[in-house]
Image (spheres, grey):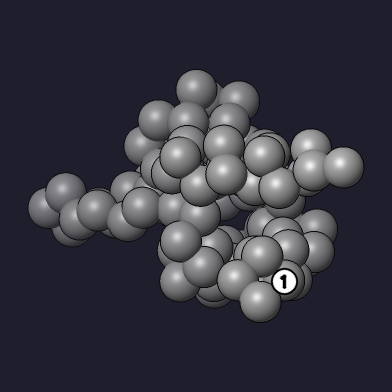
Amino acid sequence: MRYATLFKVLSEPARLQILSRLAADGCGPVSVNDITESIGLSQPTVSHHLRKLTEAGLLERAQQGRTVIHSIRPELFAELRTVLQME
């Protein structure tokens, strides 16, 4: 059930685009504004998708002053890779 939930979250193209953007930056922390500027979606839309990805455990969220940054949780992606390689 857990993996079904994760794959459901990942089924949204905008979320995959956001994850791709984060991965392109080496999975390091990125602000909402950085993501918004690079993928061409509105700030509220990006924030919504980031919240969904964070709730699913795919991202970590941290507050730095007034800025919220997000970063990929690589251990969860390693787990998903293992699941996808099952025969």
Question: Can residue 20 be seen from the camera position used here?
Answer: yes
x then y, percent, for residue 37: 57, 44
Using the rendered image of the protein, determine whether residue 9 is visible from the camera's viewpoint.
Answer: no
Residue 8 vertical position relative to residue 23 in the rendered view, above or below: below
Q: Residue at x 65, y 47 (%)?
A: 80
Q: Toward the viewer: 51 or 8?
A: 8
Report the residue marked by disc 1: 4
The outermost residue toward the left is: 65
Quadrant holding the C terminus:
top right
Residue pictured at 72% horizontal, 71% vertical: 4
Nearer to the camera, 79 or 87: 87
Percent position (x, y) of residue 72? 46, 42
For the N terminus, the quadrant is bottom right
What x and y, as percent, mark residue 30? 41, 39
Q: In this view, does 49 lie to the left or right of 30?
A: right
What residue is at 46 percent from the left and 71 percent from the top?
55
Q: In this view, does 68 lie above or below 45?
A: above
- Residue that appears at 79% across and 38% down: 85
Query: Residue 81 lies in what quarter of the image?
Result: top right
Counting every numbered tag in the picture gives 1
Q: How crowded is mark 1: few (under 14 residues within 10 Å), some or many (20 or more)?
A: few
Quarter of the image where one finds residue 79: top right
- Element at label 1: helix
33 relative position to 35: left or right: left
Q: Is residue 17 above or below residue 47?
A: above
Q: Three-letter amino acid code at disc 1?
A: Ala
